[in-house]
Amino acid sequence: MKKRFWILLTAAVLAMALMGAAAAAAVPERREDTADPAEEAYDGYILTEYEGEIGVLRGGELILRSGIAVESLRETDRELVRRGIRSESYLELLGLLEDFGA
């Protein structure tokens, strides 16, 4: 009786693990720190590349040209900027610009 219980319990745990793995594989990965620069519905700030430098968009409109050349950034930072980095607040925006060298 105990052996049967453990077999059933093991089978149930494996089935749950497989279902969880399948569900996780079906959900596309979403990066919270990046955004599509053309996304106009977003109400916060978006740091993105604008004419070779870091620009700041809000509501799809360019509100700031930082003067920081995108090519002067590390490769990983260049990729993030080119994809667009969301910032929910002005203070967060200032921190990001400071990190990039403004």
Image (cartoon, rainbow, N blue to C red):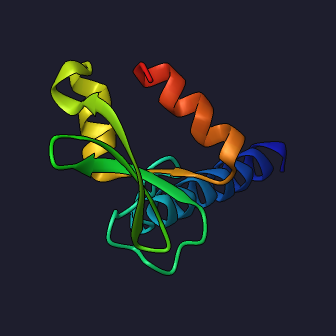
Query: Residue 57, position in %: x, y?
Result: 43, 60
Residue nearer the viewer, 101 or 37: 101
Name the image quarter holding residue 36: bottom left
**Residue at (42% x, 19% y) in the render:** 101
Give the quarter of the figure containing the C terminus.
top left
Count of numbered circles on the image: 0
Kindly give the residue lying farthest to the right in the view shown.
2
In the displayed structure, 38 sits above or below 65; it is below
Residue nearer the viewer, 18 or 100: 100
**Residue at (65% x, 39% y) in the render:** 92
**Residue at (52% x, 23% y) in the render:** 98
Kindly give the residue lying farthest to the bottom in the view shown.
41
User: Is residue 51 left or right of 57 when viewed as pictured?
Assistant: left
Query: Residue 94, position in %: x, y?
Result: 60, 34
Query: Residue 78, position in %: x, y?
Result: 25, 32
Residue nearer the viewer, 29 or 39: 39
Query: Residue 93, position in %: x, y?
Result: 58, 41
User: Is residue 83 left or right of 43 when viewed as pictured?
Assistant: left
In the displayed structure, 40 sits above or below 19; it is below
